[in-house]
Image: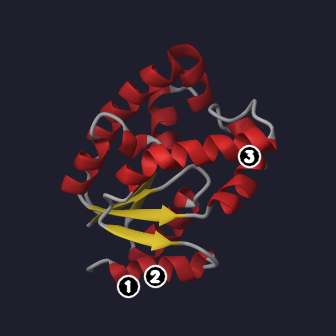
């Protein structure tokens, strides 16, 4: 079984992925952490040295390696499905789950994490909300190609994991 968690940055993919993998007794891979481990560089450093376009090529190459593995839950970067036909690669190699989180919730979460995220680190809160809104509009059609779509709303972590488990054919 392979489960790929997709959604905008700050949607909780890594947190939920760890919990889900523990409960299903599957390996867990956070694609960004995997890239950092393999390259010996942080995502921020990769962006600084290669720009977003360079990072997206690298991300695609590492995703192709990850999809060959079995019995895992993979947390993908927010943009991963949206470049290089990655959504097709993801859907051909497992079950994708879109964590659909409200704009205001994303803005609140990401305003606290800006320094760790190269695409938003220099934005004030008003710019941040506009940035997220524009990107969500562009990415939503890709995200909605997921096998399973879950509106997160007010679910806590445990409820969300249970909902994913119910929707996935085990």
Most foreground residue, 85 or 104: 104
Marks 2 & 1, CB-CB < 8 Å contact? yes
Most foreground residue, 149 or 16: 149
Horizontal side of 62 relative to 14 (left or right) equals left
Q: Earlier in the sequence, mark 1 or mark 3?
A: 3
Q: Residue at x 70, y 38 (%)?
A: 116
* Residue 165 location, quadrant: bottom left
Q: Which SS class for mark 3?
A: loop
Q: Which SS class for mark 1?
A: helix
Task: Residue 121: give x, y in percent of width and height.
Answer: 72, 33
Examine the rendered structure and indicate whether residue 94 appears above or below residue 39: below
Q: Residue at x 55, y 72 (%)?
A: 152
* Mark 3 Cα shell of 10 Å, populated few (<14), some (14-19), many (≥20): few
* Mark 2 Cα shell of 10 Å, populated few (<14), some (14-19), many (≥20): some
* Mark 1 Cα shell of 10 Å, populated few (<14), some (14-19), many (≥20): few
Horizontal side of 128 relative to 139 (left or right) equals right
Q: Is residue 135 visible?
A: yes
Q: Residue at x 38, y 41 (%)?
A: 82
Q: Which residue carries the number 1 mark?
A: 166
Q: Which mark is residue 163?
A: 2
Q: Is residue 78 visible?
A: no
Q: Which mark is residue 57?
A: none
Examine the rendered structure and indicate whether residue 14 appears above or below residue 62: below
Q: Earlier in the sequence, mark 3 or mark 2?
A: 3
The residues tagged by marks 3 and 2 sit, at their Cα atoms, a distance apart of: 26 Å
């Amino acid at each position: 079984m392979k489960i790929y968690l997709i959604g905008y940055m700050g949607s909780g993919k890594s947190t939920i992925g760890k919990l889900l993998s523990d409960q299903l007794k599957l390996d867990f891979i956070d694609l960004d952490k995997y890239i950092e481990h393999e390259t010996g560089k942080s995502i921020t450093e990769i962006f600084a040295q290669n720009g977003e376009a360079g990072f997206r090529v690298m991300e695609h190459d590492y995703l192709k390696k990850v999809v060959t593995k079995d019995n895992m839950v993979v947390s993908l970067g927010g943009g991963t499905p949206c470049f290089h036909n990655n959504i097709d690669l993801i859907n051909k190699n497992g079950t994708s789950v879109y964590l659909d989180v409200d704009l205001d919730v994303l803005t609140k979460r990401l305003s606290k994490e800006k320094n760790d995220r190269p695409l938003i680190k220099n934005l004030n809160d008003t710019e941040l909300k506009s940035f997220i809104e524009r990107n969500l509009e562009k990415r939503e059609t890709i995200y909605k190609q997921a096998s399973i779509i879950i509106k997160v709303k007010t679910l806590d972590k445990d409820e969300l994991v249970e909902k994913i488990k119910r929707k996935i054919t085990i």
